Image: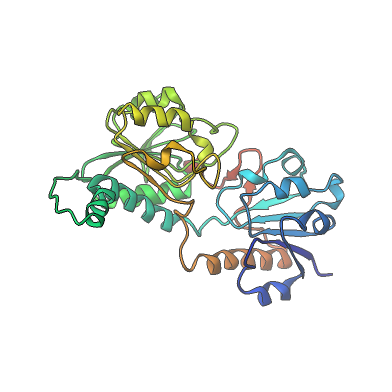
Amino acid sequence: MRDRLVVLYRGNRPPATAHIERLADTVYATEEELPYLLPGADVLLAWVTITPAIREAWPDDPEKAPRWVHASSAGVDSFLFPTLVGNPGVVLTNARGVYEQPTAEYVLGLILALAKDFPGSWEHQRRREWRPRPSDGITGCTVLVWGTGPIGRTIARLLRAVGMRVCGAGRKARTDDPDFGTVHGVRTVRSALTEADYVVLAAPLTQDTRGMVDASVLAAMKPGARLINVGRGGLVDEEALVDHLAAGRLAGAALDVFAQEPLPAESPLWNMPGVMISPHTAGETISEREALVEVFLDNFARRIEGRPLRNVVDKRRGYVVDDTRSA
């Protein structure tokens, strides 16, 4: 008997729909249609992931909930609501493996842009102003990557390759990590902040990490340091960040994610000196859509063949756990 698959989409459907439709009886649902089409489905492919629609459409009857939910994203915070997390019959998987390298490249680009003040150069070019000036180097600078999962690890490896000194921050402290060397835990992360020229946030958004970069953490950062967030907007107290940037304690920030997306037009972050803003695109590439479908198709083949699924999320922790080093 074939599975009934619901594909949640917005705007464009995923590519390779013919391949998807060969595997299951497939229906496509917008966010408005989802409450009518989700109950009784066996599988949900969430092509849209940052949305309240899944929580709002989730069946009250556990027997009518999908047995498998696949998120076409690395972050799964939109899926961590009680009726999904608490249902042991629901398996949640994500798109781990797609976003690591593109995000790492994006972070390196942001660090270079901040250090070399590319935004300032582009502004002078726009005004046809010839203004030679020195810029910062990045070789030998210290980077604290907060979040030691696959994305954080790939960031660490790339930044080490260009001569930066990298350490990590995660749930478990250790000194022999193959990618970070030293990983700081809760007790030592504040001391690491005082040494870091760049703090890169790559952690998932969970109950433990929400708001973790608050006013006290920002105050502990090295004066003149820069903050880069490619994790989730909810990791940062944005009001406190604005205050620290305005006071000149931080040299700048590169922000790809925000507590509210799109970032409201009235946010002071738009016009703050030294701040770079991008619309949650750090991991996106031209070939991303095809890669996301490949991950889903591979997992669907595993489901049909009775093999274990890849990228199974620990719903209590909020991320995939398959290596103690990434904890």
Relative to 187, is 26 above or below? below
Splitting the image into 4 quarters, where does residue 5 fall? Answer: bottom right
Q: Is residue 168 above or below residue 90?
A: above
Q: Nearest the camera: 323 or 192?
A: 192
Q: Count up the numbered dots.
A: 0
Q: Is residue 65 left or right of residue 70?
A: right
Structure colour scheme: rainbow
The residue that appears at 71% across and 51% down in the rendered structure is 91
Question: What residue appears at the point 27 percent right and 32 percent down from the top-left corner?
Answer: 224
Q: Quadrant of residue 173?
A: top left
Picture coordinates of residue 246 (x, y %)?
A: 35, 29
Which quadrant holds the N terminus?
bottom right
Above or below residue 24? Residue 34 is: above
Q: Identify the image quadrant of residue 188.
A: top left
Q: Nearer the viewer, residue 237 or 303?
A: 237
**Of residues 7 and 313, the one drawn nearer to the viewer in this rendering:** 7
Residue found 47% across the figure and 33% down from its top: 238
Relative image position of residue 90 (x, y in whole percent): 75, 49
For image coordinates 58% across by 44% down, the residue present is 319
- Image position, residue 185 (x, y; %): 44, 29
The picture places residue 295, in percent across and down from the top left corner, at 58, 64
Describe residue 205's horizontal placement relative to residue 127 as left or right: right
